[in-house]
Image (cartoon, rainbow, N blue to C red):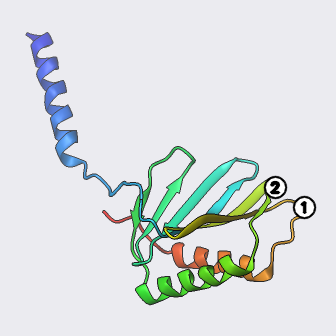
């Protein structure tokens, strides 16, 4: 009798947990136009990536193999400005691949052109100030964003 009671209790707890847990919006943003940015490395080897879409949707993942988590969107006009800046930079700047112990990156993926990526962080790495400022501004846009529940 105790054995049956234990099995029923385990089933009820399992069902309760399945019903009570609300899934978060996890997906892979697959729009053809997107800005990916973030950082990786350091003592702990952390990896954080954000993905901004033209309509202002914002995603984050912590860890290379993690799933994307949808965050609160940013203003569409601000998103459009970021895409416009990157479109200009795509014409002016060559790709940069100078990672270091702690590295930062900006990647621009567009449906009508190849992906363009800038990665820097090495002691000899000297990215253009415009690229560093763009990365800082993108990070500022993403920091206060909370996951969409």
Residue extending furthest toward the right: 124
Q: Nearer the viewer, residue 123 or 97?
A: 97
27 w.r.t. 79: above or below: above
Res. 111 mark: none
Left or right: 43, with 80 as reference point: right
| Residue 4 figure quarter | top left
Of the image marks 2 and 1, the number of the one nearer the N terminus: 2
Which residue is drawn at the image coordinates 81% and 55% (left, top)?
Answer: 100
- Please tell me which residue is depicted at 40% across the width and 76% down the height of the picture: 73
Residue depicted at x 59% and y 57%: 48
* Alpha-carbon span between mark 2 and mark 1: 7 Å
Residue 98 as seen in the image, left or right of residue 78: right
Q: Determine the secondary structure under disc 2.
A: loop
Q: Position of residue 81 (x, y in %)?
A: 53, 87
Q: Which residue is mark 2?
A: 100
**Which residue bears the numbered disc 1?**
123
Q: Residues within 10 Å of mark 2 (few under 14, many from 20)?
A: some
Q: Which quadrant of the view contains residue 10? A: top left
Horizontal side of residue 11 vs 145, given as left or right: left
Q: Are marks 2 and 1 in contact (CB under 8 Å)?
A: yes
- Left or right of 12 in this view: 42: right
Q: Quadrant of the N terminus?
A: top left
Seen from the viewer's position, the closer of residues 140 and 114 is 114
In percent of width and height, residue 57 lies at 40, 72
Residue 107 appears at what percent x and percent y? 62, 65
- Say if residue 97 shows up in the picture: yes
Circle 1 — which element? Answer: loop
Determine crowd level at label 1: few under 14, some 14-19, many 20+ residues with C-alpha closer than 10 A: few
- Classify residue 133 by image quadrant: bottom right
Please state which of residues 43 and 61 is positioned toward the viewer in this rendering: 61
Q: Residue at x 39, y 73 (%)?
A: 72
Classify 9 as above or below 134.
above
């Amino acid at each position: 009798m105790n054995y049956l009671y234990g099995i029923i209790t385990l089933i009820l707890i399992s069902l309760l947990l399945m019903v009570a847990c609300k899934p978060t919006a996890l997906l892979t943003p697959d729009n053809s136009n997107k800005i990916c940015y973030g950082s990786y490395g350091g003592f702990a080897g952390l990896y954080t990536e954000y993905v901004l879409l033209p309509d202002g949707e914002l995603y984050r993942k912590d860890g290379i193999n993690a799933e994307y988590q949808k965050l609160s969107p940013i203003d569409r006009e601000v998103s459009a400005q970021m895409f416009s800046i990157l479109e200009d930079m795509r014409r002016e700047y060559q790709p940069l691949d100078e990672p270091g112990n702690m590295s930062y990156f900006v990647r621009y993926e567009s449906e009508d052109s190849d992906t363009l990526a800038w990665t820097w962080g090495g002691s000899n790495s000297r990215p253009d100030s415009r690229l560093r400022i763009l990365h800082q501004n993108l990070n500022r846009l993403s920091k206060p964003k909370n996951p969409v529940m």
